[in-house]
Amino acid sequence: MRLVEEYSLWFYLIWYQLKQEEASRQLFEKMPVSPGAVIFVGDSQTEQCEWREWMALPDTLRVLNRGITADHVSGVLERLPEILRHRPAAVFLMIGINDLLFGKSPADILPVYDRIIKTVRQQSPHTRLVVLTLPPVNNQIKNIGLPNEAVRRLNAALALLAQGNGLLLLDLYGPLSDGNAQLDARFTEAGLHLNG
């Protein structure tokens, strides 16, 4: 009986998350177009961060947050029409942690990431695309179930992909790491998401 209860809870949580993801997508599609905006794109690490404050962006700059909890590289690829309809001045892309959590390797993730880059370049050639490395996780605060070595491997692959495409790479991993190469506790309460 306990197994059935745990399975039912797990199934409900997945169902709930999919409903939330769809609601976010529909909301974004209903929002007015914001030409020239700076858009942060990704998963919950993007969604739950106050990028204007973290990056010290001026109030005059239009900043849109297009992070969706539980999203993955394929989800971002599917969402590009909504993002690119704004003809953004810049897109900051940070995605891949959920792919890693579900056992995908950089070799699985990079081809889709490359399609994201190519799509942005083709459909919005004036948009500056910036690749953000994934920050480390802190498994001491909360066991995320993902070793930082996996994050480092993906980040190394993203660095090569960005370089090969002539894109700016903004490293978040190094500056947000503590002395043990984990997400510094000053920047997180949950071990995965940045505070604020």
Image (tube, grey):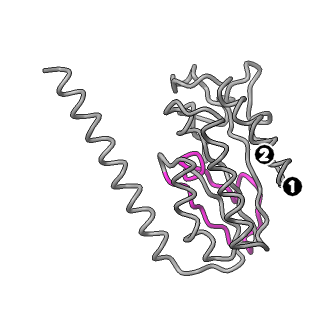
Q: Looking at the picture, does residue 163 appear above or below residue 58?
A: above
Judged from the image, the secondary structure of the residue bearing numbered disc 2 is helix
The quarter in which the N terminus is drawn is top left
Tell me residue 67's x, y (percent).
55, 55
* Disc assigned to residue 82: none
Of 194 and 75, nearer the camera is: 75
The residue sitting at 68% across, 23% down in the picture is 149
Tell me where the magenta segment starts and ends, as one range: 43-68
Identify which amino acid the numbered label 1 is placed on. Answer: Gly
Tally of marks: 2
Taking the image as shown, residue 65 lies to the left or right of residue 1, namely right
**Residue 58: percent from the left, percent from the top?**
77, 67
Q: Residue at x 24, y 29 (%)?
A: 7
Choose the circle earlier in sequence order: 1 or 2.
2
CB contact under 8 Å: marks 1 and 2: no
Q: Is residue 19 above or below residue 9?
A: below
Mark 1–mark 2 distance (CA, rounded to whole Å): 9 Å
Q: Is residue 24 left or right of residue 118?
A: left
How packed mark 2 is, by other alpha carbons closer than 10 Å (few <14, some 14-19, many 20 or more), is some
Disc sitting over residue 161 in the figure: 2
Amino acid marked by disc 2:
Leu
Question: Disc 1 designates what residue?
Answer: 166
Question: Residue 161 appears at what percent x and percent y?
Answer: 78, 45
Residue located at (66% from left, 67% from top) = 63
Tag 1 secondary structure: loop
Image vertical order of residue 22 relative to residue 2, above or below: below
Q: What residue do we see at 62% from left, 30% from top?
A: 137
Q: Is residue 66 magenta?
A: yes
Of residues 180 and 33, the one nearer the viewer is 33
Closest to the observer, 170 or 187:
170
Dot 1: within a 10 Å radius of its alpha carbon, few (fewer than 14), some, or many (20 or more) residues? few
Instruction: Judge whether 180 appears above or below 30 on screen.
Output: above
